[in-house]
Amino acid sequence: MTRTAGAAAPRRQASLNLAPIGNCGVSALLDRQARYVWACVPRVDGDPVFSALLAGPDDALPAALGTWAIELEDFAGSRQVYERNTPIVRTILSDTQGAEVELIDFCPRFRRYDRVYRPIAFVRLVRPLKGSPRIRVHLAPAADWGARAAEQTFGSNHIRYLASGGVLRLTTTAPVSLIRAGQPFRLEREQVFFLGPDEPFEGELGPSLRAMYEKTRDYWQYWVRTLSTPLDWQEEVIRAAITLKLCVHEETGAIVAALTTSIPEAPNSGRNWDYRYCWLRDAYYTIQALNRLGAADILEGYLAYLRNIVDAAPNGRIQPVYGVGLEPILQERVVDSLPGYRGMGPVRAGNQAHEQQQNDVYGQIVLASAQAFFDSRLLRPSGFEDFHALESVGDRAYAEYDKPDSGLWEFRSKAHAHTYSALMCWCACDRLAHVATRLGVHDRAAHWAARADDIRAAIEHRAWNADRGHFGAVLDGSGMDASLLQLLDTRFLTVDDPRFHATLAAVERDLRRGEHVLRYATEDDFGLPETAFNFCTFWFVEALHQVGRSAEARSLFQSMLARRSHAGLLSEDSDFHTGEAWGNYPQTYSLAGLINCAIMLSNPWSIVR
């Protein structure tokens, strides 16, 4: 049997067909050949130790810096799936001779010593399935945002990598000398790899990692069993829910908007942003979707994060975004050492949005918090002290609802009094009135109801454009914005209100592009939008169903499902001509929209019970 020494997969263009693994502390993105192309340490917003996703216009893997690949000689193809109801990735590589190798990748997560064990660690189990496969282990962690290779030291069974976010130690049963030399070898038995903290691995490596695999699998499958899934689209919803949980930084309860930075919203658009932080708006929509599935654990963690945010803002002024460790300053900078996704820079770290005024955030804080005053399942139900803390948020909402801000789309060079921001401020006051009633504080209930009535009157008078016959994007102005569809979901309008029907018709006329919906169709800081915003398409699906156009809604929803990656996930944006994925990935907005629509459109369980 002859082989081509060193033969590898051909170069190819970078793609968002990526499968996340993670443990609510760290995460990584694997391509279809199980190559690690993105992972940050010591947490999601850290320096990328695997940075190849942003390393240039084409995919030079496995030779590239910032990757971890198990390279199969005479590579012919790969198959990849998630283990059922887990974020554990199983990949099979095959060669031209018919030999096959199985790779199992995961980040350990399970209960140990009465707490959750979720180390900064990545585990690979590699074993031969057929024939006599020869592999090469290419492990090249980067440092300083891909500017250089991490320095190495080594021992008989380990290699230490001095990355910018801390030292990682690879402990393995594979020959260390062959890994360091990049030398191919025959895979005759299972080899295991633990890339984690810089400390000696306790216990026998192979059995310990196999036990970690089983415990991690069991943890996730038991967690999924607690979800109240719809009858239809269960696999799609479960995959979205697991991935939303991977976007949680469990130590603090923060929920990041996505696991990546600087994937452009459209080709060569410059719309490249760092989404590895906790936007309170995005987190609210994530919590809303997961609440509908009954995932109370994530709600409670996020409420603890929110309480710390509110405590740190005694005057009520809240930023739209914070770091996962509650950091208020997220200084934005351009990283010159990485050319960007497909060479489409810039690559940014940090986000200037932390400086912006976005008045909708006050509503999202109260909306996310309100359930805890009513939900008897919670380990820590909210009470009077929590209500009084939220009143400062409500005060700010009432003071700012009609003031110009950057809006939910974070315009950088213009400010308006956005209807959506006013709507969310109304939500803050309206829900505080409901909470006060629940607590029996009737004078405060009347106070907040009166304030909600004031904001309602202003929206109905100033956002309604009588000339055009629909609500407009800004107070005392015109323009169309997909966020106006939230007038129904927030209960500001009812489904039989002709004003909503007129506004829905205007959104469809002005913002729909085939099977996609834009956020807005006017120029912003970067020109006209070139892609559609997936979450807005899901909002539109919900609205179609609620006004009785259910067949259209289901058809459009199925089209969106067809655009998911092979891992069953969505990015932020879609090209409305080709459907290609753009924007950061996986995007919590998009996955929350998928869950919400599936729940709304599904047949009831009663038809099979």
Image (cartoon, rainbow, N blue to C red):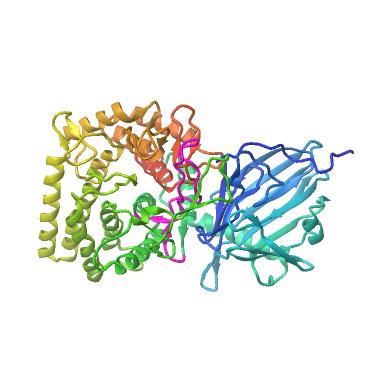
Total tally of numbered discs in the picture: 0
In the rendered image, residue 335, in percent from the top left (x then y), is placed at 53, 52
Where residue 325 sits, quadrant-wise, is bottom left
In the rendered image, residue 124, in percent from the top left (x then y), is placed at 67, 56
In the rendered image, residue 169, in percent from the top left (x then y), is placed at 68, 65
The span picked out in magenta is: 251-280
Looking at the image, residue 558 sits to the left or right of residue 128; the answer is left
Q: Main secondary structure of the magenta part?
A: loop
Looking at the image, residue 250 sits to the left or right of residue 40; the answer is left
Looking at the image, residue 407 sits to the left or right of residue 88; the answer is left
* Residue 325 shows up from this direction: yes
Write the residue at 45% across / 44% down.
Answer: 237
Q: Looking at the figure, which quarter contains the C terminus? A: top left
* Residue 603 shows up from this direction: no
Q: Residue furthest right?
A: 1
Write the residue at 37% across / 38% down.
Answer: 538
Reply yes or no: does residue 273 show up in magenta.
yes
Position above or below: 344 against 309: above
Question: Looking at the image, which is closer to me, 187 or 522?
Answer: 522
